[in-house]
Amino acid sequence: MTTRTKAVVAGVAVGLLLMPLIGFWMSLLVVLGVPAVAYLALDPAQRRRLRRISRKELR
């Protein structure tokens, strides 16, 4: 199983676990918001590097 597949499976699992506890829209906000906040937490040099390299090099 690739790293990307593991991340997708973990995201789906988190979404399914949160849905009954906090509702669909809040769980969707968490699943989409956490990666966005993590990206925004990077400094500008790290963001440039992340955009510059291809997805294949991220593995």
Image: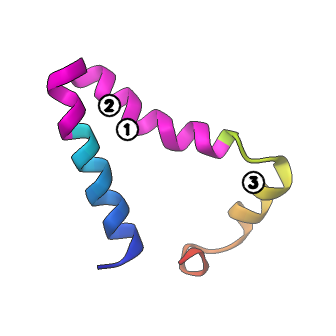
Q: Is residue 55 shown above or below 39?
A: below
The residue wearing badge 3 is: 47
For mark 1, give the secondary structure.
helix
Which of the pair 18/39 is nearer the observer?
18
Which of the pair 49/38 is nearer the observer?
38
- Is residue 24 visible in the rendered structure shown here? yes
Cα separation between marks 2 and 3: 24 Å
The residue wearing badge 2 is: 28
Q: Amino acid at mark 1?
A: Val
**Side of 42 relative to 59 (left or right):** right
Write the residue at 22% across / 24% down.
24
User: Does the residue at mark 1 contact the one at mark 2 (Cβ under 8 Å)?
Assistant: yes
x and y percentages locating residue 30 in the rendered image = 39, 31
Chain part drawn in magenta: 16-39
Write the residue at 42% across / 37% down.
32
Cα separation between marks 1 and 2: 5 Å
**Side of 15 relative to 36 (left or right):** left
Cα separation between marks 1 and 3: 21 Å
The answer to if 18 sits in the magenta stretch is yes
Asked where in the image residue 47 lies, by quadrant, the reply is bottom right
Seen as rendered, the residue at the extreme right is 45
x and y percentages locating residue 49 in the rendered image = 77, 64
Q: Amino acid at mark 2?
A: Leu
The residue wearing badge 1 is: 31
For mark 2, give the secondary structure.
helix
